[in-house]
Image (cartoon, rainbow, N blue to C red):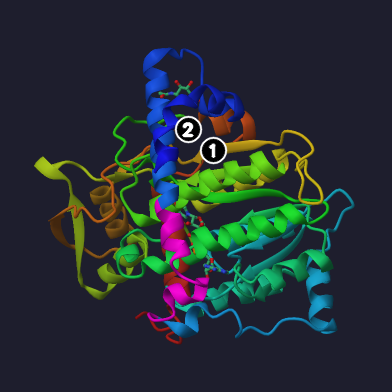
Amino acid sequence: MSHIDSAPSTPGKVKMEKSSYFFTRGGGARWHYSLAKLTVWSFAFLALILIFFLRSPAPSAITSAADPSRRSLRNYNWGGSAWEKRVRASARARSSNGLTVLVTGAAGFVGTHVSSALKRRGDGVLGIDNFNDYYDPSLKRARQALLERTGVFIVEGDINDEALLRKLFEVVPFTHVMHLAAQAGVRYAMENPGSYVHSNIAGFVNLLEVCKSVNPQPAIVWASSSSVYGLNTKVPFSEKDRTDQPASLYAATKKAGEEIAHTYNHIYGLSLTGLRFFTVYGPWGRPDMAYFFFTKDILKGKQIAIFEAANHGTVARDFTYIDDIVKGCLGALDTAEKSTGSGGKKRGPAQLRVFNLGNTSPVPVSELVSILERLLKVKAKRNIMKLPRNGDVQYTHANISYAQRELGYKPTTDLQTGLKKFVRWYLNYYSDGKKAVE
Ligand SMILES: NC(=O)c1ccc[n+]([C@@H]2O[C@H](COP(=O)([O-])OP(=O)(O)OC[C@H]3O[C@@H](n4cnc5c(N)ncnc54)[C@H](O)[C@@H]3O)[C@@H](O)[C@H]2O)c1
Ligand SMILES: *[C@@H]1O[C@H](CO)[C@@H](O)[C@H](O)[C@H]1NC(C)=O
C-alpha cells in the first residue's frame, strides 16, 4: 500500500503528463487536493482490480465455474486460406484514403451501426465478436446477417484470444481499432462479476498488448461510459469532473479502462480516444435496456417497474439516439492522430482523449414510458418503486461542448423521434412470429 501513501506528492507530475483536457486553468490548492485524491482513488481501484485478476491463473478460470461454454477461447474456428480471404476482402477500403478498421463487438448494438456506417462510406471494416449469450444471441446473429449483406465479415472469437488478434493484424494492417466489445449492463455485475473483468479489463489489456506491438500501431477509439461519473452530483457532467466514485462494478471496469488507456498511451505511444456514451437507444438495440424491455412488457400487458429516487426524486437519463452516437464515433476515428510507437517502443507523445457523447437533454423515465404508451397505443401498468442502490444512478446529463468542438459532434434526434424509429423496428422485427420474445 506504500504506493498509495506516496501518491499525494505526484500531482504536479501527473498534471504535466496527462493531456490538457482533463485539467483546465484555474488550479489552486483545492484543485491539487482533488487531483491528489483522484490519483489515490485511481491507484487503490487499479490495485483492487489487479488483485482480483492475479488471483485467477487464467481469464477463463475466473468465470468457468459460472458458465464454461461462454468464455472458452478454444471453441472458435478460425484460420485457413478461405478464412483469410474473407478477412482481407471485408477489410479492404473502397478508396485509397479510406480507413481500415477492426471493430470489436461488431455484432453488438453500437458495433453493428458503426460497422455499417463505416462500410457505407467506403472504409474497410472487419468485425470480431464472441456472440456471448448475455442477451438473446439470435439478435446478434440477425445483426451479423445484416452486416454480411453490406460486405462486413464478423470473425467469431474473443478479444482475449491473443493468437487470433495477432493473426488478424498479420493479415490486415489495420489503421484504426474501434473497440466496442464489452460486458455491458449495470445490475448484471452482481450476478456475474467475472464477465466484466474478463471482457472490460483482461480483454482490453490483451487488445492493447497486441496493438502496441504491431507495426504500424493502429489508433484506438473505444467505448467508456457515462457511468464513470458515478455518484457525482454536479451536472451537466463534464470530462474534467471527478470519476472516482463508481456506483457499479461495470462503471468501475470502465473507469479502469480509462486509466489503462492512459498507461498504454504513456508507455507505448498508442493514440487512444475514450468515448463516454450516455444511454444509447434505437433500432437493433439491447434487450437488457429499459426502453427495450418496457416496450416488450407494455405490449404484453405486464407491469413495469419505474424507479424514483428518495423524496419522489425524478430518475432521468440523457438518452442518446444511435445515429448521433455513430456520428460521434466516426468523428473520433477521423480526428484520431496516428500512434507514435513502433516495435513496442514509444517514439514520442501520442494523442489521449476522452469525450462525452450524450444528447444534453435528460428525460425522466416516466416521460419515456409516456412516449412509449403513445407510440404503442397501449397503456402501461406502472409500478413505481424506489431506486435500488445496486448500480443505477439517479440522473445523467452530458456536457458535450468538448466533443462539439473537437469532433463536430452535434446530436439532432430527440427522444420522441428516436423512439418512433425504435418502435417501428421493434414491431417489424418481432412481428413475423419466428423470433420469440422471451
Ligand atoms: N448502449 C449503451 O447505452 C452504452 C452506454 C455506455 C457505454 N456503452 C458501451 O458501448 C459498447 C457497445 O455497447 P452495446 O450497447 O453495443 O453493447 P452490446 O452488448 O450490444 O455489444 C457488445 C458486443 O461485444 C461482444 N463481446 C463482449 N465481450 C466480448 C469478448 N470478450 N470478446 C469478443 N466480443 C465480446 C458481445 O457479444 C456484444 O455483441 C460497450 O463497450 C458498452 O459498454 C454502451
Ligand atoms: C462544459 O464543458 C466545458 C469544457 O469542455 C466547460 O468550459 C464548460 O464550462 C462546461 N459547461 C457547463 C455548463 O458545465
Mark 2 is surrounded, within 10 Å at the Cα level, by few (under 14), some (14 to 19) or many (20 or more) other residues, namely: many
Q: Residue at x 59, y 79 (%)?
A: 73
**Mark 1 = which residue?**
355
Tell me: is circle 2 under 8 Å from ligand 2: yes
Identify whether 231 is placed above or below 99.
above
Q: Residue at x 72, y 41 (%)?
A: 269
**Mark 2 = which residue?**
239
Q: Are marks 1 and 2 in contact (CB under 8 Å)?
A: yes
Residue 304 x %, y %: 21, 64
Identify whether 272 is placed above or below 287.
above
Q: Residue at x 52, y 53 (%)?
A: 322
- Name which residue type carries label 1: Phe
Identify whether 170 is placed above or below 136.
above
Q: Earlier in the sequence, mark 1 or mark 2?
A: 2
Residue numbers of the magenta segment: 48-66
Left/right of residue 219 with respect to residue 298 in the rendered view: right
- Res. 284 visible in picture: no
Mark 1 is surrounded, within 10 Å at the Cα level, by few (under 14), some (14 to 19) or many (20 or more) other residues, namely: many
Name the quadrant of the N terminus: top left
* Quarter of the view holding residue 407: top right
Q: Nearer the viewer, residue 343 or 221?
A: 343
**How many numbered tags mark residues here?**
2
**What secondary structure is the magenta-colored segment mainly?**
helix
